[in-house]
Amino acid sequence: MNWDKISGNWKQLKGKARVKWGKLTDDELDVIAGNREQLVGKIQERYGIAKDEAENQVKKFESTL
C-alpha cells in the first residue's frame, strides 16, 4: 500500500500504528493524521532512535498493509 492510501485511510489504520508503536498516544496519532514525516519524527522522539531506523520501521509498517 502506498503512503497516499495510508494517509487517506489513517483513521482505520491508526489502530495498527498504535499496536506497532505503543508508546505513541492516540492524541499524537490524531495530530500525525497520516503524515509520514510526522510519524517518523514522533517515532524518533518516543523511542530515542535515529531517523534512519525510524524510516526503516515505517517502511516495514507500510509494506505490511
Image: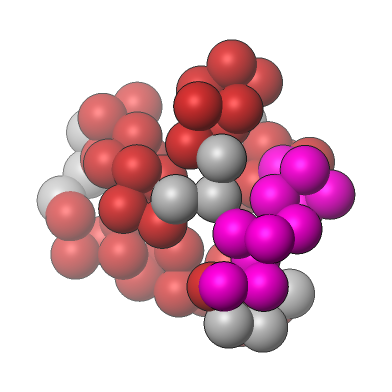
Corner quadrant of residue 57? bottom left
33 to the left or right of 11:
left
Q: What stretch is highlighted in magenta?
A: 4-14
Viewer-nearest residue: 21 or 2: 2
Colour approach in the figure: secondary structure
Q: Measured from the top left, where is residue 31 in percent x and y?
A: 50, 27
Residue 16 in sight: no
State the residue at coordinates (19%, 64%). Answer: 52
Q: In this view, does 49 lie above or below 58?
A: above
Is 40 inside the magenta-drawn segment? no
Residue 38 in sight: yes
State the residue at coordinates (27%, 41%). Answer: 41
Q: In this view, does 43 lie above or below 34?
A: above
Corner quadrant of residue 8? bottom right
34 to the left or right of 36:
right
State the residue at coordinates (48%, 36%). Answer: 32
